[in-house]
């Protein structure tokens, strides 16, 4: 938690030379996010009022941020800020899809991948100061989204092992809050040893040119890195960026105790490449793909770090320039 007077001083200092024509900002707050509290929310809103006309709304449940963001676009807000984790950002992006209302972020989650991708600092004080300075050079830009079935995501999606881990972690929010990345690691080991060693779900990944890749886990990226382990960026596939018009990804062909240590090493080591592992296939530069279960079992699906259900088929389509952002 930052010192109380730090954010207060930020707001007061920026208010001294604030423009007379302030932009309207709606802050969508996830009060259950890892680092968010009522006190911190009030301090952040107070500071942002040094440059903007600010309203703040707390979410109360799943998909609330989508409805709130959609209404904000209809009401003509100049910018919507998602204050929470990547799940809150994802919901807000779904609400702003196709509109010209820009989305921005304040880091309130455990990882905050999209905020970092937009160039927003991962420290809440620095991020608030960043948004205050943006008011003087307000330059929204268009970036891509990717649709999978009836949901869009901003930077990543996964089917299989990582989605099952996400489901387990999200079902224990207190442990997620307390242990962070280490609880993800524990959940991953537990699920791998109980569900993916003996009989993992099988899937087929079909690319636009007809190439078919078979495996047990598929990871799709709209940007690089895929995620972070604490401060370590996880570079899984190469080539995709927020405005490249395509996606990249990897397919884990099999999951056995002998190959997983090498896979994990290549995920975490700064100069290693996961795609060069013998159990991994990489794809890049595609504008869509289809993942289907080959044994009939539903496969867990996550987008932007949130488990959204189990599916037997997932259809991915790039939506170029579908979201306006401010970073």
Image (cartoon, rainbow, N blue to C red):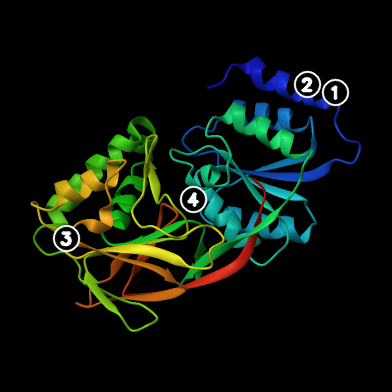
Q: Distance between the residues labelled 4 and 1?
A: 35 Å
- Residues tagged 1 and 2 counted as in contact (Cβ below 8 A): yes
> Which residue is disc 4 drawn over?
87
Q: Distance between the residues labelled 4 and 3?
A: 32 Å
Viewer-proximal residue among 193 and 241: 241
- Asked whether, in this view, residue 118 is left or right of residue 86, the answer is right
Instruction: Please rate how many residues cluster around mark 3, counting C-alpha atoms within 10 Å: few if below 14, some from 14 to 19, many from 20.
Output: few
Element type at mark 4: helix
> Which residue is disc 1 drawn over?
16
Element type at mark 1: loop
Q: Of discs 2 and 3, which sits in the foreground?
A: 3
Q: Residue furthest bottom?
A: 210
- Asked whether, in this view, residue 307 is left or right of residue 152, the answer is left
> Which residue is disc 3 drawn over?
278
Instruction: Please rate how many residues cluster around mark 4, counting C-alpha atoms within 10 Å: few if below 14, some from 14 to 19, many from 20.
Output: many
- Residues tagged 3 and 1 counted as in contact (Cβ below 8 A): no
Image coordinates of residue 9 in percent, x first then y, are 72, 18
Viewer-proximal residue among 116 and 203: 116
Element type at mark 2: helix
Q: Of discs 4 and 1, which sits in the foreground?
A: 1
Q: How far apart are marks 1 and 2 (CA)?
A: 6 Å
- Placement of the C terminus among the 4 image quadrants: top right
> Which residue is disc 2 drawn over?
13
Q: Of discs 4 and 2, which sits in the foreground?
A: 2
Specify whether residue 259 is in view.
yes
- Residues tagged 4 and 1 counted as in contact (Cβ below 8 A): no
| Quadrant assignment, res 143 | bottom right
């Amino acid at each position: 938690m930052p010192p109380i007077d730090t954010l207060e001083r930020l707001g007061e200092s920026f208010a001294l030379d604030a423009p007379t024509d302030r932009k309207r900002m709606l802050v969508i707050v996830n009060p259950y996010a890892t680092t968010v509290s009522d006190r911190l929310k009030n301090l952040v809103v107070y500071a942002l009022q040094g440059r903007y006309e600010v309203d703040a709304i707390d979410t109360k449940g799943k998909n609330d941020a989508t409805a709130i963001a959609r209404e904000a676009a209809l009401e003509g807000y100049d910018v919507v800020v998602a204050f929470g984790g990547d799940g809150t950002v994802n919901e807000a992006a779904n609400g702003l899809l196709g509109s010209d209302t820009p989305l921005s972020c304040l880091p309130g989650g455990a990882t905050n991948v999209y905020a970092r991708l937009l160039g927003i600092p991962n420290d809440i004080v620095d991020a608030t100061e960043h948004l205050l300075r943006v008011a003087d050079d307000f330059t929204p830009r268009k970036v891509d989204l990717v649709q999978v079935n009836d949901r869009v995501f901003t930077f990543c999606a996964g089917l299989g092992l990582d989605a099952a881990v996400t489901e387990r972690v999200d079902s224990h929010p207190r442990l997620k809050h307390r242990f962070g990345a280490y609880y993800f690691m524990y959940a991953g080991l537990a699920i791998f040893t109980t569900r993916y060693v003996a009989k993992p779900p099988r899937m087929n990944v079909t690319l636009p040119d007809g190439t078919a890749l078979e495996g047990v886990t598929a990871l799709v990226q709209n940007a690089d890195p895929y995620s972070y382990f604490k401060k370590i960026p996880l570079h899984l596939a190469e080539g995709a960026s927020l405005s490249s018009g395509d996606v990249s990804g990897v397919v884990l062909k099999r999951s056995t105790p002998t190959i997983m240590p090498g896979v994990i090493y290549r995920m975490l080591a700064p100069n290693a490449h996961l795609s060069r592992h013998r159990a991994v296939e990489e794809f890049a530069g595609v504008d869509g793909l289809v993942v289907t279960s080959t044994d009939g079992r539903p496969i867990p699906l996550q987008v932007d770090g949130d488990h959204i259900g189990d599916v037997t088929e997932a259809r991915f389509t790039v939506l170029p320039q579908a979201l306006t952002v401010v970073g």
